[in-house]
Image (cartoon, rainbow, N blue to C red):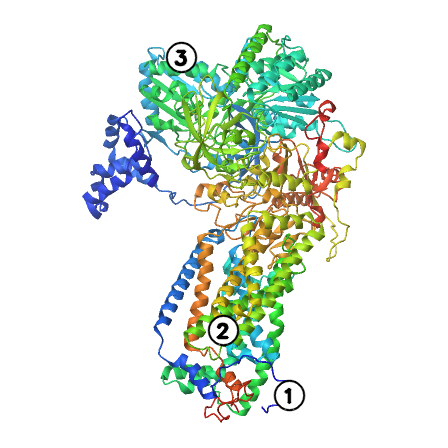
Amino acid sequence: MATIDSPLPKPYKPPVVAPGHTPGTVTDKISSVVLRRTPKWWYVGFGISFSILMMFLFCVTYLFAKGVGIWGINQPVGWGFDIINFVWWIGIGHAGTLISAILLLLRQEWRTSINRFAEAMTLFAVACAGMYPVLHLGRPWLAYWLFPYPNTMGMWPQFRSPLIWDVFAVSTYATVSALFWYVGLIPDLATLRDRTRNRAMKIAYGFGAMGWRGSAAHWHNYETAYLLLAGLATPLVISVHTVVSFDFAVGQVPGWHATIFPPYFVAGAIYAGFAMVLTLAIPLRAAFHLEDFITTRHLQNMAKVMLATGLIVVYGYMAELFFGWYSGNIYERFMLMNRATGPYRFHWFALLLCNAVVPQLLWLRRFRTSPFWLFVISMFVSVGMWLERFIIIVTSLHRDFLPSSWGLYKGTIWDWGTFIGTIGLFLSLIFLFIRFLPMISIFEMRTIVPGGTEGGEYTTAPEQEPGISTEQGAVP
Amino acid sequence: MESVNDSKGKCGAEASAQPQPVRLDLAEVREKLSRQRGPEVWRSLEELAETPEFEEFLHREFPRQASEIDAVSRRGFLQLAGASLALAGLTGCTKQPPEGIVPYVKQPEYIVPGRPLFFATTLVHGGYAQGVLAESHMGRPTKIEGNPDHPASLGSTDVFAQAAVLTLYDPERSQSILHDGRIATWGAFVADLGNRLRALQGLGGEGVRILTGTVTSPTFAAQMQDLLTRFPRARWHQWEAAGGHHGRAAATRAFGQPLATRYDFSAARVVLAIDSDVLTEGPGNVRYQRDFARTRRVRKGNLQMSRLYAVESIPTNTGTLADHRLPLPAAEIEAFTLALAQAVGAATAGGDVLTDARARKFVQAIAQDLRANAGASIVAADEYSSPAVQVLVHAINQALGNSGRTVFHTAPVDAAPVDHVASMRELVTDMSAGRVELLLMLGGVNPVYTAPADLGFTPALQKVPLRVHHGLYENETSEYCQWHVPAAHELESWGDARSFDGTVSLMQPLIEPLYSGKTGHEVIAALFANRADATSFELVQAHWKTLLVGNFEEAWRKVVHDGIVPATQLPPAGASVDGGAVQQAANDIRASLQRARSEGSNKVTLRLRPDPTVWDGSLAQNVWLQELPKPLSKLTWDNALMVGPATAERLKVSHEETAEVSWNGRKVQAAVWVLPGMAEGTATLSLGYGRRRAGRATGLGFSAYELRTSQNLWNLPGAEIRGLAGRHDFACTQNHHVLPQGKRKSGMGEDGEIPLAGEQAEKRHLVMTGTLEEFRSDPDFIKKEREEPEPGESLYPGWKYEGHKWGMAIDLNVCTGCSTCIVACQAENNIPVVGKEQVQRGREMHWIRVDRYYAGDMDDPRIHNQPVPCMQCENAPCEVVCPVAATVHSDEGLNDMVYNRCVGTRYCSNNCPYKVRRFNFLRYSDRETPVLALLQNPDVTVRMRGVMEKCTYCVQRIEQAKIESKVENRPIPAGTLQTACQQACPTQAIVFGDINDPESEVTRWKSDPLSYGLLEMLNTRPRTTYLAKITNPNPALAAGQAHPEHEERT
């Protein structure tokens, strides 16, 4: 791109890619992560994650054998860790699509180096989330009754139930996210196919690449499809968590029945999602020495998104408090008093600390640019968002309308086992992903380094003239 | 198996000290067996039979924990090894031999598959009869209803009657005759005992002793009469642990003879209950509740209402209904009674005995009220008051002219009205002195567990050469007996018994004895009348043959059909209270008062009471009763040392903490439960727990019997309570987590859940209350409080109900909180029991519950009961959120639950503001125990795990009634269609019917200005509505009362 003279000097922007990279080095660097020999720590990490996954399998087997009574749920708290975890995971699964689709449409090219694994994370989080609605059923073997399919019973699902809306929202989201992710992978799979020396891998990548040769026609179709999918995915970012929030907002339990829920849930989801992206990006970046691609600018930008969405979430809390008081409704008022002074008050204060207080550090550049502090703050946010769902679900249910039916809720060892187990599943999938697939989009990165189609935003002059790549997966 | 080994370990250590029942160690035998014989033991039965170890193992396997005392007879038994081996092997199998099933060749009359039959019969509780109708499905009784013709029932029942059908099928019932713990036969039993008795008969039966509980059965009494003629030196002892000991003593003192007292509440305008749960406890309670409720049904246009005062040390169901309730410690209640007796002129005035100003005010006001309603009032004290108090109460009733009008004294109802304590003392003395050769304990008496602790029954029992126990269960006593004979359940037996008013009702079997049980009639006939083959039918019929008037066949058929023997009610006897007895009682009270008032302030008065659900412990194995939340405390599966908040604070004991109670050198450890409304300085521990040998109830709760002596049966003044560090996990169904940790004020501080719940319940207008005066001055005063939404405030169009439109109304004004509805519902709807651990986790399954709310001062609260079934909302929040349409509205307004469509999301339950839905978190229904399958109501699905369930308004009954009306082409007759809770309710507080019928009772109730719905502002439009609780306070007391009633609604 030609440089346009402007009357004012451009403000300094940290680079999206560290200086000195060419399309060739980008390809080398990223594909080498996959094509190199497996590092030892990977085995350790995957081993641990996989063991946790096996524990999950054990918990689920026991669950299917005995019933949901092994969990801590009761009367009146009919939902516990199951739905908390569902909402938590599905919230985490929001960052990927947001980064991929919305930021793509908004032409935020800094998204390029994080979108691939953010999308992968989304998929894995949705996989974790998607299991809970089945696991939490009293009779999980009948979960298919929630789908509208022709049957001899002549029964449709009950379309007024938000749980049915959930089924559509989550399954659509999972499908579109998977497609989006896979379509984005095709050119890179072709690159790997061409570069790997392992015969079996070549065949495997070859299947995945679906005959990609990098022709102009391919690129044309690809760009169109990708953009369309981005367009499709964009409303989903908003809709999925909106629908999830309806599970509560449509109910009439004080603490659930609130109009603020959809925007509040969407903001919370993005908040949690970005926290999880940071939680994963910071160690990966260090482990694979990807500081050149996932730069401080990326971290900063993500921190800013977190700060912004975090503030929306805090606004949600304030709105809940205000409307609880302003409504004059004794049930709402009691619910809020009970949050602050009842048996779960420590959870509530921990939630405020994690979600509202600690993230305020992000106002300071020092914290925004420090990977260590960002990691710590993201952890706080992840815990805080889990607590938020705990507060919404458990504290609202445990003391609702009739004081005679009040109760308490506590997760059992099986609740924790299942929860930690899904984290094991998530991490196992992440480990497999970083081992076998390029965690950063190679071809998209090539477009933003000097020599790529869109040039770079270097403040210094590029050291190398744009060259034509010899790779098949190169820009047309 | 583990438990067997454990108990062996404990017993082994004590065995050297004194003779104890020895239990077998299965593991040891098995190990020895495997070591010595290896796998080849199983090659042939003959080979096995020669192996002593194996024989021993085999014979001892069945009588688990059996005693092994008589070595000679065991060896003799082993000689029959070959035969018994095969027999024992067979009995060990649960599988029945294959049988061909053939249809009836001749269809028996009346038996239509799918249609139940009802038989009038009798259930006995504490010796007294309650007439019932047993529902039988194809020959198996499934449900108990009250017998409308029976004076103690009038169609209603109590919790014990409702739960009886579970005891019938209880797989833990003893299933065979045991001799030294080994299976034996009836023939062997009769032969063995016959030999001994022949020897004793020559001596006139010297040394023969028979111990029973309270007996009201005329047939049994006649048999005993006959026995005592044949064996003139034999003795009949009685011990009914929770019987009317004080009542009998008081009557003897007051009238010179042990007269029985009964009340007619329907004629009483003013009632005073002195430390007495007269309405919901005791033989006449069902009838009393019905009669009392009749005087409390306030409606628009009927403003007549009786007034109830309760002065009590322990909050009771009666107290929850009281217009004025005064908590007083036991000693002060005695003073109160004396003061009242003086005030109404029943006792000579002699100085003011009351120190408490409030009590004094109560005495004045009540005395005035009683005098104003002389002849139409009742002062009731029951069994648990001292004889002195009861003597005074008799005198008060006489002075007021109530005797003969509302209070009736009759000849004693029990067949042999002896002083049980004296009878027991005599027995123990004779046993210790070696004068007893044969002790026959009939009818499930369990003296090893229930005998007064000071008598030393158990060591004395071991001096008796031959001990025989007859009962439904093996228990602590059967452990010490050579012979145990399983008893037949009332639903398996012919028999008869008297109810509280003397009316004789007949017991007829609904089913062949499941476990070859024998009735007491049969045991007595076989042993003492040489009629081993006599059946109870023959015995009972023979007894009545001479007594029924007219053609015997016809008369007998009618008696069996109706369940009652006509004209057997005991007529009122003219009796006057002895003046000397009154003087004596007054002196006794003054003396005990002086003692109590001089006592150290760290002492409490411990009051023992029968447990509201498991009674004296004989019902401990009935899991419906175990899991039934006890009225007021809402505890299940446990008893507790209950103290009031102030007392707990003073004694420095905390809720759910263990404490040591010591009294007169006896000590018991129990866990504390802080119960609002307990009088200061009073503690209570109910009987019936701490069983050592009671199957699944073993080890639950704490034994009060260890403190109970022959002198102090109910009242233990000067007991000390010392807090221990340990904690006890209770299973409570309401506001379980009462206490914030570290608050000494026993959790009744501001963030304790119970006061918070009470406060919120008032704010939320859950239990609407008012006074009669308010209602009189403004009939719509409740209506003005209601937050009824505008009609049509819904997104969905309304439904027009063309046919039926079902609805229910509950009258809070007469609900005593007795909880019979809960057990009735459980029996009708196949509701499973979940066990203590699951209740602790808040997973009890009852479809109807009785909510209890406290208001005001926790040491003297107002207490409200509110039964809550499903509201069957018109705009049901559960229906819209179910993703699979498993809960839907019927075209008759029911909120139906489709079990086989439910996938178990629990969303409906979360969204139910009344929290009446119940979820099968695990597989709660017992489908493995074959005998329990017989118990199930065939008209109701047995739910599997993972599905939601809830009250259906007994939809199976609705459908049955509709089918019948269609078949007979007529509308459903009024009053014939009743839900199970409604039918069982002693006060008829529940009414169900068609709201489309303007004439129906339910429509009338719902259109009353007192009617309101629960949480109406949610626009759920509940079909179950309530009638507000109206009190009738005495103006003389209302003004100065600590918490005027009208505050309640503000």
Above or below for A244 versus B791: below
Q: Chain of mark 3?
A: B
Residue B54 falls left or right of residue B114: left
Kindly state the secondary structure of the residue where label 1 is placed: loop
Residue at (55% x, 77% y) in the render? A111
Label drawn at residue B119: none
Q: CA distance from mark 2 to mark 3?
A: 95 Å
Point out the tag, 1 or 2, that comes first from the N-terminus: 1
Residue type at mark 3?
Arg
Q: Are marks 1 and 2 in contact (CB under 8 Å)?
A: no
Mark 3: give few (<14), some (14-19) or many (20+) Cα within 10 Å: some
| Furthest-front residue in this view | A8
Look at mark 2 in the image and give the residue it sits on.
A120
Instruction: Tell whether label 3 touches label 1 (CB within 8 Å).
Output: no
Q: Is residue B336 left or right of residue B429?
A: right
Q: Residue at x 61, y 74 (%)?
A: A234
Mark 1 chain: A
- Please name the residue that numbered disc 1 is placed on: A6
Figure check: B701 above or below B373: below
Q: Amino acid at mark 1?
A: Ser
Where residue B159 appears, as percent x and y from the top left, is 55, 33
Dividing the picture into quadrants, the one containing residue B161 is top right
Q: Nearer the observer, disc 1 or disc 3?
A: 1
> Can you give x and y, in whole percent of width and height, for residue B243 in the image?
50, 21
| Residue under pointer 3 | B230
Q: Crowding at label 2, few (<14), some or many (≥20) Cα neighbours within 10 Å? A: many
Extreme-left residue of the structure: B36
User: Which of A407/B22 is in front?
Assistant: A407
Which label sits in the foreground, 2 or 3? 2
Question: Residue lying farthest top?
Answer: B580
